[in-house]
Image (tube, rainbow, N blue to C red):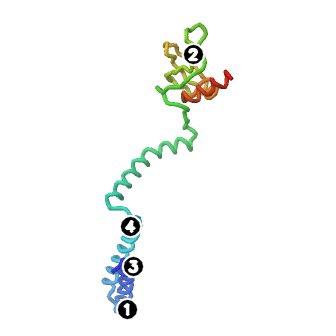
Amino acid sequence: MTIDGAIKRTEKAVKRCRKSDEMKLAREYEELNGWLKKLKAYKKTGLTPEEVVALRESFDAMKKEAVPLLRAKVEDRLAELPCRLGGTVYVNFSIEGDYLRMKDRPYPCEVVFIGLSNEPFMHIQFPNGRVFPVDFDKIGKTVFLTRKEAETALKGQEG
């Protein structure tokens, strides 16, 4: 017997019970019919019970993390940063008076501070320890998120 066949049988049984005034039995068949329909919907997913439980746990964990972020976005309190604190950016400039060889460009720098104001900025630390402020609008011009981007910009400046 298939699930569809069982659903049809319970529907017929409900009608038969109602005609013969067996309401308690009709309600039991209706409940069984509902369970069969849920089982059919579950089988349609192709997932095992364990996979359904794992999916539910994963959804709950994501929801717990996503709801505050969505609320912050709606309230215009969410800022998307171009890089992470402690991450590396690459620059094609040096601070005047510092000894940094031109041939070593681009220089890898660590992002040591990110400031959010009307004009967002970050502080980057050069390999020699010097810290320099950089506005976000310099990203892609003199500050780059990858070495490859910085090297491509250098080639464009030289050529």
Q: In x, y percent, where is residue 140? A: 62, 29
On screen, 49 above or below 147? below
Which comes before the other along the chain, label 2 or label 3? 3
Question: How far apart are labels 3 and 4 at the CA level?
Answer: 13 Å
Residue linked to disc 4: 42
Residue contact at pointers 3 and 1, CB within 8 angstroms:
no
Question: How far apart are labels 1 and 4 at the CA level?
Answer: 32 Å
Q: Secondary structure at mark 3?
A: helix
Q: In x, y percent, where is residue 151? A: 59, 25
Q: Amino acid at mark 4?
A: Tyr
On screen, 107 above or below 54? above
Of the numbered discs in the image, which one, if any, rests on residue 19? Answer: 1
Question: How far apart are labels 2 and 1 at the CA level?
Answer: 94 Å
Q: Residue at x 59, y 7 (%)?
A: 97
Residue linked to disc 3: 4
Q: In x, y percent, where is residue 51? A: 35, 57
Which comes before the other along the chain, label 2 or label 1? 1
On screen, 69 above or below 25? above
Q: Secondary structure at mark 2?
A: helix
